[in-house]
Amino acid sequence: MIKIKNYINGKFENPINNEWIDNYNPANGDVYGQIPNSSKVDVENAYQSAKSAFRQWSQTTLEERSRILIKISELLDANLQRFAEAESKDNGKPISLAKVIDIPRAASNFRFFGNAITQFASESHESVGQNAINYTLRQPIGVVGCISPWNLPLYLFTWKIAPAIAAGNCVVAKPSEVTPMTAYLLGEICNEAGLPKGVLNIVHGLGTTTGEAIIEHPDIKAISFTGGTSTGAHIAKVAAPMFKKLSLELGGKNPNIIFADCDYDDMLETTVRSSFANQGQICLCGSRIFIEASIYDKFKVDFVEKVKQLKIGHPSEGSTDIGALVSKPHLEKVLNYIDIAKDVGGKILCGGNRVTVKHFENGYYLEPTIIEIETNDCRVNQEEIFGPVVTIMPFKTEADVLQMANKVKYGLSATLWTNNLKRTMHMSNQLQAGIVWVNTWMLRDLRTPFGGIKASGIGREGGFEALRFFTEAKNVCIKY
Ligand SMILES: NC(=O)C1=CN([C@@H]2O[C@H](COP(=O)(O)OP(=O)(O)OC[C@H]3O[C@@H](n4cnc5c(N)ncnc54)[C@H](O)[C@@H]3O)[C@@H](O)[C@H]2O)C=CC1
Ligand SMILES: O=C(O)/C=C/C=C(\O)C(=O)O
């Protein structure tokens, strides 16, 4: 049984209270390891370690920081197979996905911010007629907290850590207790890459114990969080009286809007992915699909046929398209939404049932599920399900679909399928979302601002936005 340890001051440590949490393998339901349920004392130790490292790290040249970040990315690339296997086992996602998306993207996060920090510049303003010049410093904040979820474990963990340390901060980070393994392995890589001890500290544990100790810590001055909207609201409440900087990347209930004039085959193939990639457990998945009435019947038949071809199986098999959901409670939550859909007259067009995979009968497998539904206002179309479940509905006019797309508390992303330029421009302007994809989905350029509006969060990650978040602007005005 693997016993994961905290990574504090460059060393691997047991939790002071010796409390442990079971770690499950979603593919077979077995407990295969244990992780610390770290207490306030462990978080304090991690904080002290980060604080001690800050003076030197914040003064380390940008070239040196960049060199170390890029070394970490190279080591992740070199350990692709090992990390992909660990991610797949911990999360239930197909190994093929972990190998092509999760681990390469984690490596890219370090490479990207290792390069970006050498290009990050601040502004200067000449106060014409007043004989003064202003320049703006971008100084690291100090010790910052990074808290990440279970759906894209190393991908999202490093999406926060890389810009934080590139900008000269030291970090206390907590991965999800549901998927701690690759964060644990990252500690080894950081040591090997020569990251000075204390710059990154990783504490494991429950949100309500370890996470809470991070957000309540008075000297952890900024929190970057990705996870559920209600957790984000709680973090905002705790952090507000301490005036912490906050970046909250929360849930979504994203519309996928399909017009008859789209490139149909491309749309169909991408819609299968935007619905069910990672078992639908990506905050960007298009879970509400609106189809122009004239192609609705054709789409319905073609979409169901394609989705029925997806292979549900053990995550370690190369041919698996749909692996296991991340945990038993999550599987139960998603199944409950399928029942809620049936109760309001939703018609299950395919899927809807738990699947038994031979030899792995206790794994958390669920069929990809398409539900035809008549109203946008029901719970299944308003609440984040975060699993392999999508709804489909026809629409008649641009105005109708815009109204339905926006009538939801979330505002993370939207996907639009059309070849009409005017419509593209108009709808992109009107859609209430932080990210709009047109004729594509999840095409990521790490320089772009990433995040949502409304209940999908505050702040933006990515590119210089992330470096701005992890620094304080200080204006210096000199009169000459
Ligand atoms: N935005 C997104 O992409 C994500 C959305 N979700 C949504 O949230 C729902 C619940 O999933 P959970 O795993 O329970 O998400 P969560 O929001 O509870 O967990 C995310 C992270 O926050 C930590 N956390 C939880 N409570 C905390 C607290 N009081 N203080 C500090 N940190 C805390 C967790 O330990 C984990 O590391 C999902 O069903 C899904 O709908 C979940 C994961 C990612
Ligand atoms: O940065 C990305 O490419 C994707 C981010 C996805 C999430 O934040 C999520 O699914 O929670």
Image (cartoon, helix red, strand yellow):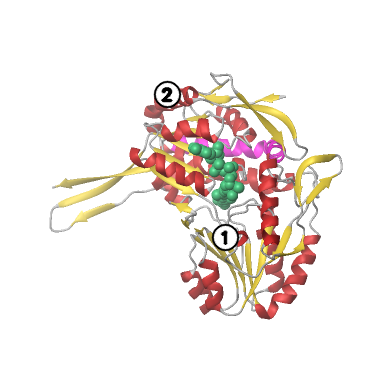
Return the residue nearer the eye: 284 or 348: 348
Q: Residues within 10 Å of mark 2 (few under 14, many from 20)?
A: some
Element marked by disc 1: helix
Left or right of 223: which side holds 344? right
Residue at horizontal 66 percent and vertical 57 percent from the top: 340
Q: Is residue 130 left or right of residue 15?
A: left
User: On the image, which quarter does residue 301 sit in?
Assistant: bottom right
| Picture coordinates of residue 324, whole percent (x, y) | 74, 45
Which stretch appears magenta?
A: 63-90
Residue sitting nearer the eye, 145 or 37: 37
Drawn side of residue 381 relative to residue 118, left or right:
right
Badge 2 amino acid? Gln
| Dominant secondary structure of the residues highlighted in magenta in the image | helix
Q: Count neighbours of disc 1 (C-alpha within 10 A) and say few if under 14, some if 14 to 19, many if 20 or more.
A: some
- Mark 1 lies on residue: 382
| Residue 400, above or below 444 | below
Q: Residue at x 54, y 45 (%)?
A: 227
Q: Which residue is mark 2?
A: 48
Tell me how far mark 1 sits from mark 2, CA to CA.
43 Å
Give coordinates of residue 424: x percent, y percent. 53, 74
Of badges 1 and 2, nearer the viewer stands 1
Could you say where residue 338 lies in the image, as x and y percent from the top left?
A: 70, 56
Point out the residue furthest to the right here.
Answer: 358
Tell whether position 80 is magenta: yes
